Image (cartoon, rainbow, N blue to C red):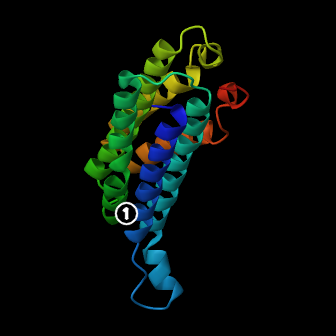
């Protein structure tokens, strides 16, 4: 299988994930600003999740664009990543409905953490399938990836102290990754 076919499949799954998230947002029953303000936790959860998924889509694109060889291990690692990303609409809706509680805040962090772990596994599998390639040189020691895993782990723990601290930690990880991973941007297949 080519990297472009894998990328196309992944793009479709990610588009469905984003579509499901937005369909979970129901308009307010009353046409007032007060009714819209009452939806603030739902809207903020959606924004955080949209940025989260968009960051994965962006970096996934550059990673696969730089990949020449795709093995069975790469395919399964990619499916593992898509599994965790596909849980994003569920935890987003739960946070939107119960943002002040620790369990939804922690569950959101677990999905984010496992997505980061799955992405790391995908990177490792791609590096193994492409020894000596430009993608190997571009990835380097992946400080941002390791930092993200540490921060998501911290966020899950903070959810049981104060959920807002967990959300702030998850937003911090998104801020770190908001600019696409430049290491891969210039790599050609």
- Residue in the picture at 48% in, 66% down: 43
Q: Is residue 35 left or right of residue 133?
A: left
Q: Position of residue 144 (x, y in %)?
A: 57, 26
Question: Is the residue 64 above or below the residue 48 in the image?
Answer: above
- Residue in the picture at 54% in, 44% down: 57
Q: Position of residue 20 (x, y in %)?
A: 39, 63
Near mark 1 (Cα within 10 A), the count class, few <14, some 14-19 or many ≥20, is: many
Q: Residue furthest bottom?
A: 31
Question: Is the residue 37 above or below the residue 12 in the image?
Answer: below
Q: Which of 82/107 is in front?
A: 82
Choose top left, top right, bottom left or bottom right for residue 60.
top right
- The answer to whether residue 49 of the structure is visible from this angle is yes
Quadrant (top left/top right/bottom left/bottom right) for the C terminus? top right
Question: Is the residue 179 above or below the residue 122 in the image?
Answer: below
Q: Is residue 186 left or right of residue 132?
A: right
Q: Secondary structure at mark 1?
A: helix
Q: Residue furthest top?
A: 132
Task: Report how many numbered discs are placed on residues in the image.
Answer: 1
Q: Which of 82/37 is in front?
A: 82
Q: Which of 71/54 is in front?
A: 71
Q: Position of residue 117 (x, y in %)?
A: 39, 28
Q: Residue furthest left?
A: 103
- Residue in the picture at 40% in, 33% down: 78
Q: Which of 55/31 is in front?
A: 55
Quadrant (top left/top right/bottom left/bottom right) for the N terminus? top left
Q: Residue furthest right?
A: 186
Residue that badge 1 annotates:
96
- The answer to whether residue 154 of the structure is visible from this angle is no
Question: Is the residue 109 above or below the residue 35 in the image?
Answer: above
- Residue in the picture at 69% in, 26% down: 188
């Amino acid at each position: 299988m080519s990297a472009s076919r894998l990328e196309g499949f992944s793009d479709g799954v990610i588009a469905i994930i984003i579509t499901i998230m937005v369909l979970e947002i129901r308009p307010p029953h009353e046409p007032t600003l007060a009714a819209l303000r009452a939806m603030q936790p739902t809207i903020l959860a959606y924004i955080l999740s949209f940025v989260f998924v968009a960051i994965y889509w962006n970096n996934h694109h550059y990673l696969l664009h730089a990949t020449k060889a795709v093995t069975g291990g790469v395919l399964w690692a990619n499916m593992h990543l898509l599994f965790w990303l596909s849980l994003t609409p569920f935890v987003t809706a739960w946070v939107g409905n119960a943002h002040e509680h620790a369990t939804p805040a922690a569950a959101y962090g677990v999905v984010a953490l496992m997505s980061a772990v799955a992405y790391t596994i995908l990177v490792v599998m791609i590096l193994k399938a492409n020894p000596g390639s430009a993608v190997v040189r571009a990835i380097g020691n992946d400080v941002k990836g390791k930092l993200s895993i540490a921060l998501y782990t911290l966020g899950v723990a903070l959810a049981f102290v104060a959920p807002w601290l967990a959300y702030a930690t998850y937003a911090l990880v998104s801020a770190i990754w908001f600019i696409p991973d430049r290491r891969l941007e210039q790599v050609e297949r």
